[in-house]
Image (cartoon, rainbow, N blue to C red):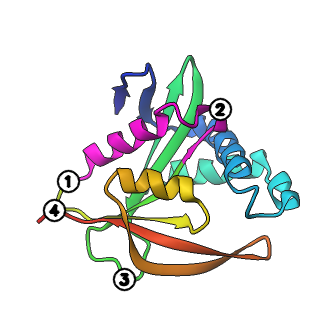
Amino acid sequence: MKVETDNDVLIRSATRADAADIARVHITSWRGAYSHVLPAEYLDSLDIAERTAQWEKILDGGSGTTLVAQADGRTLGFASFGASRDEDAEDGCLELYAIYLDPESWGRGVARDLMRTILAEVPPHVRMTLWVLSQNERAHHFYRRHGFQPDGVERIEDIADVPVTEVRFARAAER
């Protein structure tokens, strides 16, 4: 898959060769987005080589779809989605596993372009969910603009010995 957007961003399917760039964006985005939630020591300890290995496994595994957004030969962001991992998911429900941008790309429409590309692939009759930290108001606003709403389900995750609340958002299937 390849999609050229209005703002000269190329969105394409990720390959194993993209793992290091995805890892860099993933860690940089976490450091930018979660510095007010997670300890600096934890964020500083995130290792690009370890995250690259994780992304190589994900990309080699063939489950789900991962897209990268690039401009001028540089990876600006990525998104990953596939079958829902929620225990209460109905058959066919999809989950947005991740959508992250290099903080330098925030506010430039790259996330919007990634989301539109994903949603164009999702049939209208399919429900899609995602999990987001309760403190990430910027993401809440973004997801609402794309038709997602909190569905009342929350979970507590322990990240670096910090309990964080994640809220599930859902985009209802059209009937």
Closer to the camera: disc 2 or disc 1? Answer: 2
Residue 121 position (above or below residue 107) = below
**Which residue is rendered at x = 44% and y = 19% of the image?**
8
Which residue is at 79% across, 70% downward? 160
> Tags 2 and 3 in contact by the CB under 8 Å rule?
no
Q: Are marks 2 and 1 in contact (CB under 8 Å)?
A: no
**In the rendered image, the vertical position of residue 23 relative to residue 133, given as above or below:** above
SS state under label 2 = helix
User: Residue 138: horizontal and vertical position, in percent?
Assistant: 55, 52
- Residue holding disc 1: 123
Whichever of labels 4 and 2 marks the residue nearer the N terminus, that label is: 2
Residue at screen point 75% across, 52% down: 50
Q: Quadrant of residue 1?
A: top left
Question: Can you identify the residue that label 4 sits on?
Answer: 174
- Estimate the x, y position of residue 18 in percent, counting from the top left: 58, 36
Q: Is residue 107 magenta?
A: yes
Q: CA distance from mark 4 to mark 2?
A: 35 Å
Name the amino acid type tagged 4: Glu
Residue 9 screen position, x and y as percent: 45, 24
Kind of residue at badge 2: Glu
Q: Mark 3 sits on what residue?
A: 88
The residues colored magenta run: 100-123
Observer-nearest residue: 40 or 95?
40
The reply to whether callout 4 and callout 3 are in contact (CB within 8 Å) is no
